[in-house]
Image (spheres, helix red, strand yellow):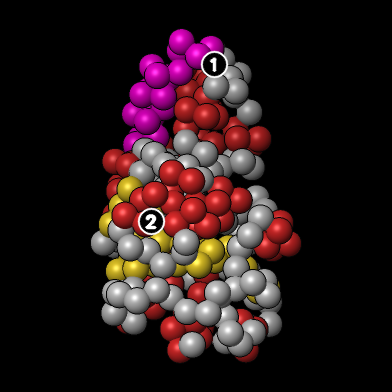
Amino acid sequence: MPSTPAAAAVSPSVVTSPAASAAAAAGPLTVGFDLDMTLLDTRPGIKATYQALSAETGTYVDGDLVTTRLGPPLTHELRNWFPEAEVPAVAARYRELYRELAFAPTVALPGAHAAVEAVRAAGGRVAVITGKYEPNALLHLEHAALHADVLVGDLWAEGKGDALREHGATVYVGDHLGDVRGAIRAGAVAVGVATGPYTAEELLAAGADVVLADLTEFPDWLAGHLAR
């Protein structure tokens, strides 16, 4: 992304690749964000939901393990614990339980609100592109008092890239290697945040253009990015 080193625009903990591109594409600014472990720490609610699902079905699910690998859609994870034929019904029940158990313990990650406001202050739109079931993602945003101009759920990796391109996003922010893949597919600036399961080095190795320690660093990065 940058023609000047990103460290000049953000705090020293930001890690930037030398391949970062020069500028955002022409047109109105749209910035995409992932949800789980990018904007919100959803781990406590997800663990509680899996524990309830396990107790109800009699099938063991390691909630602690599950919360270390958030990112792919729900059905991907359920296939690790349930026979394929049961997955649709189990997924539907999980989503019901999720509405009862997951919202209260979920909190916004540091800098999430400021990051969204930074996009708006720059005249831009916010697009949340997530692997989460879209109706539950909307409820999460409402609970956290985060407003998105666009919300698209049930997408993963390159599928996110198609949605990013459709909505004109030139930046995508996420914590997962799949988020980096989505940004690359869309031709968007891939901004990693090291608040999920991957380190800054792993995100850069996957192709992220810049990696922030967390979203508290995003407003300064965005200002520098738009100034180039």
Read off the residue under disc 1: 82
In the rendered structure, which amino acid carries the disc numbered 2?
A: Leu
Residue 117 visible, this orientation: no
Residue 95 picture quarter: top left
Is residue 62 shown above or below 29? above
**Residue at position x 57%, y 80% from top?**
2
Q: Residues within 10 Å of mark 2 (few under 14, many from 20)?
A: many
Residue 43 picture quarter: top right
Q: Position of residue 96 (x, y in %)?
A: 34, 29
Q: On the rendered image, what quadrant is the N terminus found in?
A: bottom right
User: Could you say whether the residue bearing mark 2 is in a helix, strand or loop?
Assistant: helix
- Mark closer to the chain start, 1 or 2: 1
Is 151 in front, or is 93?
Answer: 151
**Residue at position x 64%, y 36% from top?**
64
Which stretch appears magenta?
A: 83-100
In this rendering, position of residue 204 left or right of residue 70: right
Is 179 in front, or is 44?
Answer: 179
Is 92 in front, or is 16?
Answer: 16
Read off the residue under disc 2: 164
